[in-house]
Image (tube, helix red, strand yellow):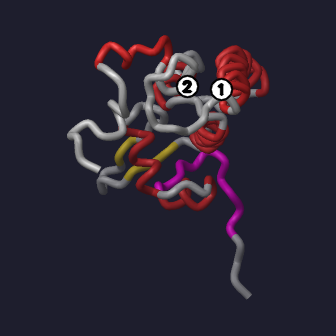
């Protein structure tokens, strides 16, 4: 029967261990690191190592991505947190409050878009006065009638 080694809570994690424990591909971890979302250091053997707090940061990143928060905004939000310690419930409260207004605004825009969708007749002219979805304020009418955006070269 194999011996199970106890987990050393202070021992750094390899990129493979972080990938396995977070469910995030190694290539994604490298990408996150390139974008400044997470940080590692190199051993004498040139292997990446991560502090264990990176697992919570990755969880925050994945939840934020699922909400549709752009990576630049995630990076900006993570910069407000202290480096080298696990993200706490208070930290998450701060981050979620920051994103709540943006999400509410996006939900409002999507609801308006949904409600305007029934007015669209799908004719493709893209210059009718009522087309608030594709051609707000009928801006394409200045170029004449017809499908300006669907057939820019005059071909079918």
| Quadrant of residue 146 within the rendered picture | top left
Check disc 2 and report the residue beneath it: 133
User: Which residue: 45% across, 15% down?
Assistant: 138
Q: In the visual, does 74 lie left or right of 89?
A: left
User: Which residue: 66% across, 31% down?
Assistant: 117
Residue 37 vertical position relative to residue 2 in the rendered view, above or below:
above
What are the residue bounds of the magenta stretch?
A: 5-15
Q: Quadrant of the N terminus?
A: bottom right
| Quadrant of residue 108 within the rendered picture | top right
Residue 28 in percent (x, y) is at 45, 50
Q: In the visual, does 15 lie left or right of 97?
A: left
Residue 87 in percent (x, y) is at 68, 30
Q: Nearer the viewer, residue 132 or 68?
A: 132
| Quadrant of residue 57 within the rendered picture | top right
Cα gap from disc 1 to disc 2, whole angstroms: 7 Å
**Magenta segment includes 133:** no
What secondary structure is found at the residue carrying circle 2? Answer: loop
Contact (Cβ within 8 Å) of mark 1 with mark 2: yes
Q: Nearer the viewer, residue 98 or 67?
A: 67
For the question of whether residue 99 can be seen, the reply is: no
For the view shown, which residue lies furthest in the left direction? 153
Residue 9 in percent (x, y) is at 66, 48
Q: Nearer the viewer, residue 18 or 98?
A: 98
Residue 45 in percent (x, y) is at 30, 56
What secondary structure is found at the residue carrying circle 1? Answer: helix
Crowd class of label 2 (few under 14; some 14 to 19; many from 20; radius 10 Å): some
Which disc, if any, is residue 113?
Answer: 1
């Amino acid at each position: 029967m194999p011996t199970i080694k106890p987990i050393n809570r202070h021992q750094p994690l390899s990129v493979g261990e972080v990938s396995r424990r977070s469910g995030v591909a190694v290539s994604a971890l490298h990408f996150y690191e390139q974008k400044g979302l997470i940080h590692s250091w190199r051993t004498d053997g040139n292997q990446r190592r991560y502090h264990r707090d990176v697992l919570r940061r990755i969880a925050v990143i994945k939840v934020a991505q699922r909400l549709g928060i752009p990576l630049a905004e995630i990076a900006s939000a993570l910069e407000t947190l202290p480096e080298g310690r696990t993200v706490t419930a208070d930290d998450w409260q701060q981050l979620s409050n920051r994103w709540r207004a943006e999400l509410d605004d996006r939900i409002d825009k999507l609801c308006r878009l949904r409600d305007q969708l029934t007015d669209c007749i799908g004719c493709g002219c893209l210059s009718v006065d009522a087309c608030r979805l594709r051609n707000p304020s009928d801006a394409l009418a200045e170029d004449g009638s017809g499908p300006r955006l669907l057939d820019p070269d005059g071909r079918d």
